[in-house]
Amino acid sequence: MKQIPSIAKHGPQPQKLAALRQAHREWSESPDTLTRLTRRLSTTLSLEHQLGILAEEIGGVVPFDALSYRHHIGGTEFVYASGMGGPHTCDYRLNLEGDYYGTLSMKRRQRFVEQELEAIELMLSAAICPIRNACRFISIEQTALTDSLTDIPNKRAMDQSLQRASLLSDRHGDQYSLILCDLDHFKDLDHFKAVNDSHGHVVGDHILKLAARELEKAVRNSDSVYRFGGEEFAVVLPHTAEQEARDVADRIRHDIEQIVVNCGETDISVTASCGVAMRLEDETAEQWVARADEALYRAKDHGRNCTRVFASIT
């Protein structure tokens, strides 16, 4: 009769569990600087919070007057600054496995000595992995908020921006205006869909990219441009009243009108209609967008290639 070996039974292993508990207790309560630094950095994926933790932990070992960090992540320049500067500086390019994750600089009034620089480098070596993860997290977030065709923020990003603007407007009384812009007339073609039908999506996509660039050039650095669907764009303008927003909308229309795309036997030119609405007190983001959309509808209904302002439509 063939003997079948019995399956080993795995019971509790109290000694290993006790050792694991002890290791966790030591890790969570250790006063060691590097252990505490890595433990604190592991609690957040916010790059700003991580840099604040890093500045605090480095400052406990090496005194400094100012710490700054700069990195271009996706399409955004990320800058962190803490403290006031001094004449003496030490700069570090943060690299891991061949990838660059920003530059960190420290300044103070006294020269940094060799032992202090070594301490800073040891702490940065412990911080680089969490910093890499935070940078990647920002990049992923940006991808989710960016229109893949035009590389400008998408409708989801616009919705978030309008919510923030509404909160700031109610809290501080700041003026915000919204422009909705819709590409309309094309040479020998009445609608944007006709461009795709007659010349293909490659030409249509090229026009959308050019329009996005013209929108970005027509506004201030403080303004934000979004693509929120098809051939429709939006601009959020902080600290901007109704007439100023109308002037910006007219400038946008003028700049878009300069777009000419050669399609071999014919050139395609573009025009746009714009609707403007300044945010009202206690108005929701949805109500604000609805008023701008109504102004845009009026602009298109009155022959297109014009600007209309809600509540003062003429």
Image: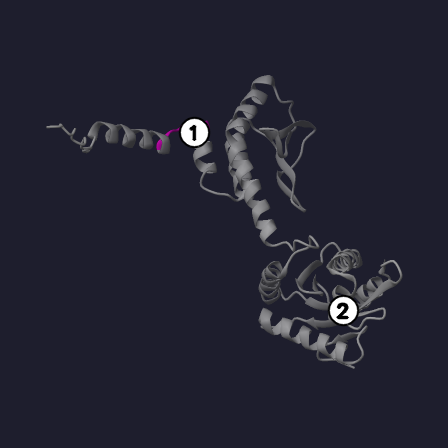
x then y, percent, for residue 157: 61, 58
Q: Is residue 30 magenta?
A: yes
Pointer 2: what residue? 194
Q: Quadrant of the C terminus?
A: bottom right
Labels 2 and 1: the sequence-earlier one: 1
Q: Is residue 144 magenta?
A: no
> Nearest the camera: 281 or 147?
147
x then y, percent, for residue 158: 63, 61
* Image point (61%, 64%), residue name: 162
Q: Is residue 231 left or right of residue 114?
A: right
- Please determine whether, in this image, residue 294 is positioned above or below residue 285: below
* Image point (61%, 30%), residue name: 94
Q: Is residue 31 left or right of residue 167?
A: left
Identified by mark 1, the residue type is Thr
Pointer 1: what residue? 35
* Count of marks placed on residues: 2
Magenta span:
29-34
Q: Nearer the viewer, mark 2 or mark 1?
A: 2
Q: Is residue 141 left or right of residue 11?
A: right
Secondary structure found at label 1: helix
Secondary structure found at label 2: helix
Question: In the figure, residue 135 lies in which quadrant?
Answer: top right
Identified by mark 2, the residue type is Ala
The answer to whether residue 309 of the structure is visible from this angle is yes
- Please determine whether, in this image, residue 42 is positioned above or below residue 191: above
The span from disc 2 to disc 1 (Cα, nearest Å) is 63 Å
Question: In the figure, residue 91 lies in which quadrant?
Answer: top right
Q: Sort mark 2 into few (<14), some (14-19) or many (20+) by Cα contacts within 10 Å.
A: some
Q: Residue furthest right?
A: 265
x then y, percent, for residue 103: 64, 33
* Image point (71%, 56%), residue name: 222
x then y, percent, for residue 293: 67, 74
